[in-house]
Amino acid sequence: MAETVTPTVDDTPLPASTRRERRGWYIYDWANSAFQTTVITVFLGPFITTVAELAAGCELGADTCDGYVYPLGIRVAAGSYYPYLISLSVFLTVFVLPVIGAIADRSAHKKRLLGGAAFTGAGATVAMIFVTGDRYLLGGALFLVANISFGAALVVYNSFLPQLGGPDERDGISSRGWALGYLGGGLLLAFNLVAVTLFSEDDNPQRTLDLARWSIVSAGVWWAVFTLVPLRWLRERPGAAAALARQGNVLTDGFRQLGRTLREIKAYPLTLFFLLAFLVYNDGIQTVITLASQYGTEELRLEQSTLIITILLVQFLAFGGALSLGALARRIGAWKTVLLSLILWIGVIIGAFRLPAEAPVPFMILGAAIGLVLGGSQALSRSLFSQLIPAGKEGEYYGFYEISDKGTSWLGPLAFGLVFQLTASYRVGLVSLLIFFVVGFLLLAAVPIRRAIVAVGNTPPRVL
């Protein structure tokens, strides 16, 4: 197997990446996915909302709450507090991630940056244990720290990918990491859902709230403990720009370098065009993930147990889906495989529109289909983008990539919400998401991918 060599700050080649080092890189996907699944996807929204409702004077376990909280003196409906936190987190992330990427490119100690961001996020997640009673402000502040740190760590983590394998290896490396992430996140989520099911009491909402808090804390512990493995097994792999770090301060020079990159990025229009395509179709993917439970509850009138089983199906089948599409990419190329996955996503949306109400089995089958296509489309987008990054600017460009991943996820929910408001139909709202996959497919198909790779000075893989 061909292996890449990365220059150090002294232009001395580092040893080629080893199997042990790549396994260390995979393990970080296993570590951080617990935060995404257990915290963001399932527990944090209801938990923070309940704490805000307590602060607003509502009774614990009440079906409705019309109270308000006043963060920084601003009047906010308790039920809107968590969505506003997400919006604020997205806003801050847009500014933070490219700067973190620029600093990573100029640092000779990327592992320290990875560890610092990961342990900060994990620590803030574990500190949710102190969010008791009506401490909604503490919960909001900890969420902002954890979520921004989560994104920052991903930027540094992804910047290792081009340094761990050659052009023909990265699809497999990315797919294995993403698959392991879904497996790890699914295992912890399954454990927490079983605990909540076994120990919650219908007439004791405080017990349910406490179980949710401890589930969130468990994700922080999981994230921190397993981050120790990549910090031990990964080598320091500074980029070409790290040699300049000795001539100035890494932090201030990182800001300056980001400014230069923003001015120079127009020299790579095809890379920007790929980012635009990713922005569009990934927004559709994120919206489906975010709104699937609401669609199942409100439109299809399914029980909570059905939704839980479907969430776990998605997690575990995404493990196999990422590996399967990664194997397909070795035969036909990542670009064609991602295009194929978008066609499958279009089929998923059409299938979801036709689902009968109060029928759990078809909904679970649809969840299985989402799982099979989900991991591969995301993993291969990550590896395909690695081919489009100028050497030495991996961190900066993955900073922009993560903004496209997280900073624009309001477009799909906005379209869904507007269509629902006009039609009062969740089904029609869901169909509105087709535009993201159709337009994303057309934009990605229009990228001359081999020419785009050559334009940034990289060698294209044999199969695209």
Image (cartoon, helix red, strand yellow):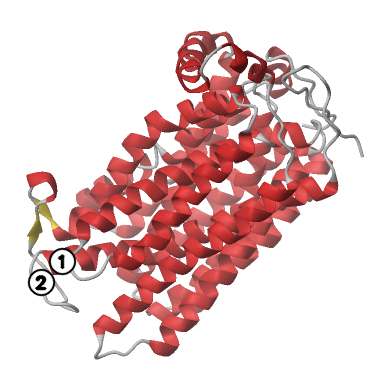
**Near-viewer residue (440 or 255):** 255
On screen, residue 171 above or below 40: above
Q: Residue at x 54, y 65 (%)?
A: 366
What residue sits right under mark 1 in the picture? 53
On screen, residue 462 above or below 376: above
**Near-viewer residue (10 or 427):** 10
Within the image, what quadrant is residue 460 found in? top right
What residue sits right under mark 2 in the picture? 58
Instruction: Look at the numbered discs 2 and 1 and tell me whether their residues touch, using CB distance below 8 Å.
Output: yes
Pointer 2 or 1: first along the chain: 1
Measured as percent of width and height from the top left, residue 344 is found at 60, 50
Measured as percent of width and height from the top left, residue 36 is found at 48, 56
The kind of residue on which mark 1 rests is Glu
Q: Residue at x 30, y 76 (%)?
A: 209
Q: Residue at x 19, y 79 (%)?
A: 61
Name the side, left or right, on which 352 lies relative to 186. left
Rate crowding at label 1 as few (under 14), some (14 to 19) or many (20 or more) other CA atoms within 10 Å: many
Measured as percent of width and height from the top left, residue 421 is found at 21, 51
**Near-viewer residue (134 or 8):** 8
Quadrant where the C terminus is found in the figure: top right
Q: How many marks?
A: 2
Label 2's element?
Answer: loop
Label 1's element?
Answer: helix
